[in-house]
Amino acid sequence: MLTAHLPSGYVLSSYLLDRLRRVPAKASWLLAAGVLGGIAPDLDMFYFHFVDMGMKHHHRYPSHWPLLWFCLLAVALLWTRWRRRAAGGWLLLAFSLGGMLHVLLDTLAGDIWWLAPFVDQRYSLVTVTARYKPWWLNFVIHWVFLVELAIWGWALWRWRSRRRWMPSASGPIAGP
């Protein structure tokens, strides 16, 4: 995935908001946590470019290890179970789900080390052959980019439809 991590985090957290009836966190914060989680694994690009100088694939860093996101998800679930009225657990839940979705989406056409750090084996559903320069052109021309465009379309549709029936997304979520 090149561009669809941010909108995928939005789609995920907006559906999470719909499913949860009573949460002590502000709806806007929960949406922000999901979106931030959706892009968080790629924050390793700063390290990749400025420290590592591109020496190893950035998907090999711990920020792209599914184990990290599963552990964060487990902590979030325990936290929400133990302290149901604490906003932090719910925010961590949205954040960790966004990060997990990021890793899942990267598995489509990017290599993900699903068993890291225990097994040095990368997994990808589709291989995008490097034929063109610059490198990103190979992804834009490949059919997997249609998946990214679909995610952007879904997020835009979701945002527009939520704006119609939700006058304010900044207050706490209250259910019937």
Image (spheres, helix red, strand yellow):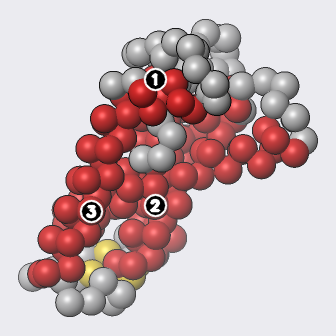
Q: What element carries label 2?
A: helix
Query: Is any part of residue 1 visible from this angle?
Result: yes
Tag nearer the camera, 3 or 2: 3
Which badge, 3 or 1, is on the more N-terminal residue?
A: 1
Where residue 99 sits in the image (x, y, percent)? 50, 46
Give the residue at x 21% y 63%: 158
Q: Residue 35 has which mark? A: 2
Q: Classify mark 1: residues with Cα within 10 Å, few (<14), some (14-19) or many (20+).
A: some
Where residue 142 appears, x then y in whole percent?
40, 24
Q: Which amino acid does label 2 sit on?
A: Val
Q: Do the residues labelled 1 and 2 touch (CB within 8 Å)?
A: no
Q: Mark 3 points at which residue?
A: 156
- Judge whether 13 appears above or below 149 on screen: below
Q: Is mark 3 on a helix, strand or loop?
A: helix
Label 3: how many residues lie within 10 Å, few (<14), some (14-19) or many (20+)? some
Between tags 1 and 2, which lies in front? Answer: 1
Give, as a three-letter code, the residue at label 1.
Ala
